[in-house]
Image: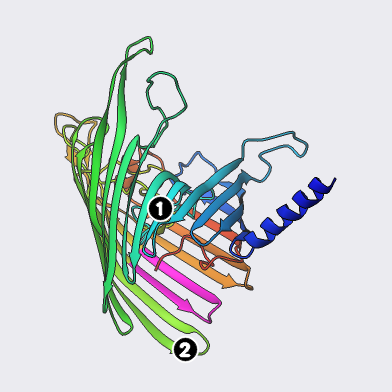
Amino acid sequence: MKKFFILGWGMLYILSCQTLYAQFKVDGQIVQRSEFRNGFGSLISEDEKPFSFIGHRARLQAAYEMDDFTFYMSIQDIRVWGSTPQVKASDNFLSVHEAWAMAKLSDTWKLKLGRQELNYDNFRFLGNLDWALQGRAHDFALVMHEKENMKFHFGGAYNQATQALVDQPFLIPNQYKIAQMARYENKWGKVQFSALFWNDGREWQNFDNSGALLEKGIRYRSTLGVPTLKYNSGNSQLAGFYYHQFGKDVAGRTLNAYNFSLAYNHMFPINSEQGKVWTLSVGTEHISGTANNESEKNNSYSPLYGTNHLFNGFMDLFYVGGVHENNVGLEDYFLRSRYAFSKKFFLQGDVHAFFAQNSIFRLEQPANQEQLDGYLGTELDFSLGYIVNDAFSIQSGYSQFFNTDTFAYIQNNPNPKGTQNWAYLMLIFRPTMINRFIGILL
């Protein structure tokens, strides 16, 4: 009995000492979003009816922090209201979003291993996909070197589908087999700058008619870019980014593609004490594409792992979920305007004019292919955001797309509805997060 008494007091002493330098934090978030879809993601046809639903994200986030070590895990439940019966034993909607450990190697070096978000720059190429309820995370090893304004991150991943005993094909959809990354950022006075290299290895396979594997290999698509280039002067900002892709696509075609954007942003302070501000942004983004009668080479840029809902209109008709990828590209000329009535409430209106970056031909006439006009359509986006309190925000929006016959043709929709629109209302409970709104860019 005496031994158990001493052991018990010893364990309590160890735990009490541990609390002096370790912290355990638990927080979370809940996002409820109702949507009306009448052309969201793809043009809706005359014979199709719109769809409405309520989606749900609930995340439980826990971190265990010591002086030189952090363990973090995020569990999430993603579902549509009514997708499971009221009485049930289990379902498939609970998953791990992040699970990583980070060790501090020195004052300027850290190592982070495990399932983690890669969220950089303007989220165009690497983003956590926060708009999508499920989000995005990578199984990755990341080394971070940071000192003052300088940050240098590099790392990589090697993916397999299972713990097999013999070699087998990697069949996880939309996933790289091997990846390497290096990213540098710094700030000099009024200039912000970052550079990124990402090497993306996708596995290809050939099977015979019986489904037996004949051969497989890895083809690499490399992306080299300047994700952030900003010059700030007073209330004005010039901003741009550039990415170039090269190597081979998974089909083996030679790849040569690019993506660039230029924008001028200006803030007009009206009443600083009340938070009244008018912000204006005008610019363009060009994403290279391949003419639809070309099959030998690939000039179609892919943003791969970005939060692409932020760009090219909120109706997600371009580069979201694979839509419009490996296509004729895009030229987006935009004007965004936001008026903040206070620090808690804003209204925003955006307009986009979309054009194809490369040629579009009517392929049903192989002997005499007709080239179509490159104008794809115009989109209007209206957004509203209101911070109720420190934990709760409300966000809503309405979008309408005015398509052309050319866009209907490349979407293979010969009879689209005259009205293509989308609306949503979102309730956001994120008491510990800086970002009070989701999926809105200015």
Q: Residues within 10 Å of mark 2 (few under 14, many from 20)?
A: few
Q: Look at the picture and state if 155 lies above or below 252.
A: below
Residue 67: give x, y in percent of width and height. 51, 62
Secondary structure beneath dot 2 equals: loop
Q: Nearer the viewer, residue 332 or 217?
A: 217
Side of 398 where 26 appears, left or right:
right
Residue 54: give x, y in percent of width and height. 62, 50
Task: Say what amino acid the circle numbered 1 marks.
Answer: Leu
Task: Say what amino acid the circle numbered 2 marks.
Answer: Ser
Residue 371: give x, y in percent of width and height. 18, 42
Q: Which secondary structure class fits the magenta region best?
A: strand
> Total label count?
2
Q: Which mark is residue 152?
A: none
Magenta highlight on residue 233: no
Q: Earlier in the sequence, mark 2 or mark 1?
A: 1
* Mark 2 or mark 1, whichever is nearer to me: 1
Q: Residues within 10 Å of mark 1 (few under 14, many from 20)?
A: some
Q: Quadrant of residue 378?
A: bottom left
Residue at image mark 1? 111
What's drawn in magenta, residue-wise? 335-351
Q: Look at the picture and state if 24 lies above or below 385.
A: above
Residue at image mark 2? 272
Q: Image point 53% across, 47% down: which residue? A: 97
Q: Image point 56% across, 44% down: which residue? A: 96
Side of 370 where 109 appears, left or right:
right
Q: Nearer the viewer, residue 91 or 327?
A: 91
Residue 393 appears in the picture as rendered: yes
Q: Quadrant of the N terminus?
A: top right
Distance, label 2 to label 1, CA atoms, is: 41 Å
